Each structure stands twice: as C-alpha cells, then as structure tokens.
Image (cartoon, rainbow, N blue to C red):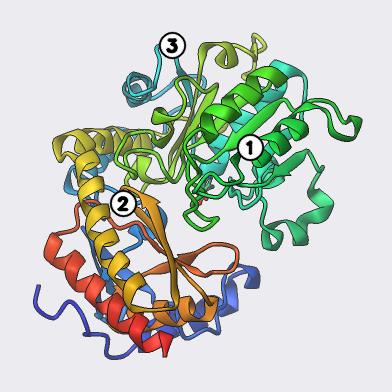
Amino acid sequence: MAGFLGTVRGRKRSAAVLRSLAEVEVPEVMDHASAFPIAIRKATGARVTDADGNRYLDLTGFFGVALAGHRNPAVATAIRTQAGRLLHGMGDVHPAEVKARLLRLLAARMPAPGYRGLLGLSGADAVEAALKFAAAATGRGAVLAFEGAYHGLSGAALEVTHGRTFREPFRAALSGRGRFAPWPARDGSDLDRCLSAARALARDPANDGPAGAVIVEPIQGRGGIRVPPPGFLAGLAGIAREAGAALVVDEVYTGCGRTGAFLASAAGIRGPDAICLGKALGGGLPISACMMAPGLASAVKGLPSEAPHTGTFLGHPLGAAAAIAVLGEIDRRGLLAAAVRVGDRIRERADAWRRRFPSVADVRGAGAMVGVELARPEVAGRTVEAALRAGVILLTEGPAGDVLAFTPPLTIADADLDRALSAVETALAEAAT
Ligand SMILES: Cc1ncc(COP(=O)(O)O)c(C=O)c1O
C-alpha cells in the first residue's frame, strides 16, 4: 500500500488522452481543455491507477457505482463465466437464463410481495419505464418532482430533472410535464409548507389536471446529498394516494445498500408503486431495474405481436450476471453494515472539519453517502483539485458544486479511508485559506 497517496507526479499521458478526445468527442461532454481530468487505466477495490501510473484512492465509487469495490472479484468472475456462455440474449423474445434469476432476487428484496421488474441499461431507463407505466395507468402525463431533483437526462427523465444546466439547451424538446415542489429542510422547519406546495401541485394547478406520478429520491444525491426530514416520504405517499398518482421512488443513487439499508426509502414508506435501481446494481456494468408493484406492473397490456416497452439489450446477460454477483456480495461481505461503518468514519472526520474550518457549513447524509457543504463553491472546487493532486478522487455535488460528496466503495480498508480523509483534510485546509 505504501506510496498510494501523494504519488501523483506527472499527467502527460492523461493530457494526451484529453487532447485526443478533444478532436473526436462532442465538445459538450466534458471540458477537454481542463487540466483536471485524469485518464483512468485500472481500478481495484478503492484503488485507482491513471494512464501515467499515478495511484489514487477513490472516495466517489465513480458516481456511486463501485459499491462492492472496483472490479469486485466475484463480479468479474461472474462476468467472465457469463461471457463464456452468452454475450447477448433476445430480451423480450428468447430471454437469457440469468434474467429470470436476477428478477427473482430483486423481487425478494422489495418491501412487499408481488413486485415485478423491467430491466434497463441506465438509471434514466428505469425512470423512463416508471413514468411511462404511470402515464399508462392513470392516463395522465404530468409528474410532480422536486427542486434539486436529478433523475437522468433522457426524454421523460429530463422532464423531471430540475437543474437548469441540463434543461436549458434542450428546452425545445421539453413538454413541461414536470412540476417542481420545494425540497424541505432537514430539520423539518418547512415540512408542512413543502408538503402543502406538493399537494397543490399534485392536484390541478392552472387546470392542467392532476399529476399521474410523483417521483422522489429518498435523499437527493446529485442535488447535494440533501436529506429530507422524517415524515416527508410518508407525507408524499399520502399526497400521491389522494391525487390517484403513482408514487415512484428513485433509488438509483441511494439503493443497493449505499445508505445502510438495501432501500433507503424502506424506513419511510412501505410499498411505493415503483422503485428505480441502477448505478451500483451492475457492479460497473450498465444495468438498471424498475421494480413495480402489481397494480402498476399490469397497467400496460402488450399487443400479442410486440412488447410496447422494450429494447434490443433488455435483460442483458452480462449485466444480469454482474448484478446477481453484486447482490451476493452485499450479503456475503455484509455491505449494509459496512455502509454504516464507513459512513460513520467519514462523518466523524467531517464533523471535526466543521468545528475546525469556518468554511464547512454542514455535514449530512445517511450511511456511506455523506455530503460536506462548504460556504463557498470555489473552496469545494479547490479542495477537489488539491485532493486529486494528493492522490484522492473526490467530487462535488449540488447545483452550485458546493458539496463534497463521499460515496466510496464500501469495501475500502479503514487504513485507506483514513489516509484519503487526511489528504482531503489537508486539501481543505489549503483551499480554505
Ligand atoms: C437519483 C438518480 N436517478 C437517476 C439517475 C440517472 O442515472 P443514469 O446516469 O445511469 O441514467 C441518477 C444519476 O446520477 C441519479 O442520481
């Protein structure tokens, strides 16, 4: 392990990859001229190596995906075994064997019996499925969502993603079916006001008719690790019921154990109409699931000859095999308990930062999903850059980029986590001055 931190010497190869990308990639995708990005060569557990051979510790899980560790051995073995058998099935015609196994395992982890799943390749796919089925079930396309929400960037998902950056360039493609209610403060001080606003928007604002779906993240992830107060999810469930709308819980970020429970929403609500999973589910392979309660699952009746909602790669065998392995690892390695342990370790350090640095405004989260809000976004940005220079991969969340987001692999060794947090502490001290 020696030498894992502070070994970032040069980034010549990374810079060359960036220059090469700049010539062939759509400019919108990233800032190719920036000196910040590294080109990643390999990753194992929580350790990452870049194209120049520099080594890093990962506190992001690469957008929360590497929950069971980068290139988790059980996941890699499952992929190799599956690759030796079948790379591609015929999703809705001749399914891969593994698809049935995965859906049975997922159904068993739902909060009530009878859930059925529809697999996709991205979080946005799972959200699309939920919102399409909700529209089919209710005959209503309007959706109640929340300020700060992030549900993905494809058609229906973008309609309910709040950020201006994502919506503005594609305004002409938006129908306006998303209605955004305020997100309540964690201390519950404005809970009643926010729920009243949500109720009014779910009913019939401006005579556009009631919403057909209510979509919510149990904790807003990309919105800045924003935790709602107790009672919020239950209140929303009541609002959805009153409005006859489907309640869709987007657990793409929070799900699969990130917060210490398989579903972060399970403590707040018993049986939402749909639960979206993605990110960590495939252990690094692109697979997602929209799990629907029986009523919503049977809302769409397929035509005899064609499935009305499907895709070429539906129930992809490699993704399904990887997801089965991830679910096994969650149990075998006790990753739900690990999420709590890792999260507590991060929070303990972050609470000390709050006492030490006036620039740290808040520490929040659940399990191993921890947000450290800084009073000024530029301090967050500088901290992330300084951490990378010291060998730690860290990212910000929140529309202003002012929240340091900690979502590491849950398999990270205590010593690695402590070293990475010490490097962040130094970076924070440097950035705050
Ligand atoms: C809560 C939530 N939903 C949906 C998505 C979209 O997932 P994907 O980027 O895989 O489409 C994300 C991505 O960050 C997310 O955080």
Classify residue 370 as left or right of residue 222: left
Q: Earlier in the sequence, mark 3 or mark 1?
A: 3
Residue 130 image position (x, y, % from top left): 59, 29
- The response on whether ligand 1 sits within 8 Å of label 2 is no
Name which residue type carries label 2: Ala
Q: Residue furthest front?
A: 189
Nearest the eye: 344 or 217:
344
Instruction: Classify residue 181 by image quadrant.
Output: top right
Q: CA distance from mark 2 to mark 3?
A: 29 Å
| The label number, if any, that marks residue 192 in the structure image | 1
Nearest the eye: 350 or 293:
350
Q: Residue at x 15, y 41 (%)?
A: 333
Instruction: Classify residue 408 by image quadrant.
Output: bottom left
Contact between marks 2 and 3 (CB within 8 A): the answer is: no
Q: Residue at x 68, y 22 (%)?
A: 245
Q: Quadrant of the C terminus?
A: bottom left
The local secondary structure at tag 3 comes to loop
| The label number, if any, that marks residue 114 in the structure image | 3
Contact between marks 1 and 2 (CB within 8 A): the answer is: no
Q: Earlier in the sequence, mark 1 or mark 2?
A: 1
Rate crowding at label 3 as few (under 14), some (14 to 19) or many (20 or more) other CA atoms within 10 Å: some
Q: CA distance from mark 1 to mark 2?
A: 29 Å
Rate crowding at label 1 as few (under 14), some (14 to 19) or many (20 or more) other CA atoms within 10 Å: some
Classify residue 405 as left or right of residue 83: right
Up-down relation of residue 81 to residue 244 (above or below): below
Name which residue type carries label 1: Asp
Nearest the eye: 118 or 92:
118
Q: Which residue is mark 2?
A: 368
The local secondary structure at tag 2 comes to loop
- Nearer the observer: mark 2 or 3; the answer is 2
- Can the viewer see residue 310? no
Q: CA distance from mark 3 to mark 1?
A: 33 Å
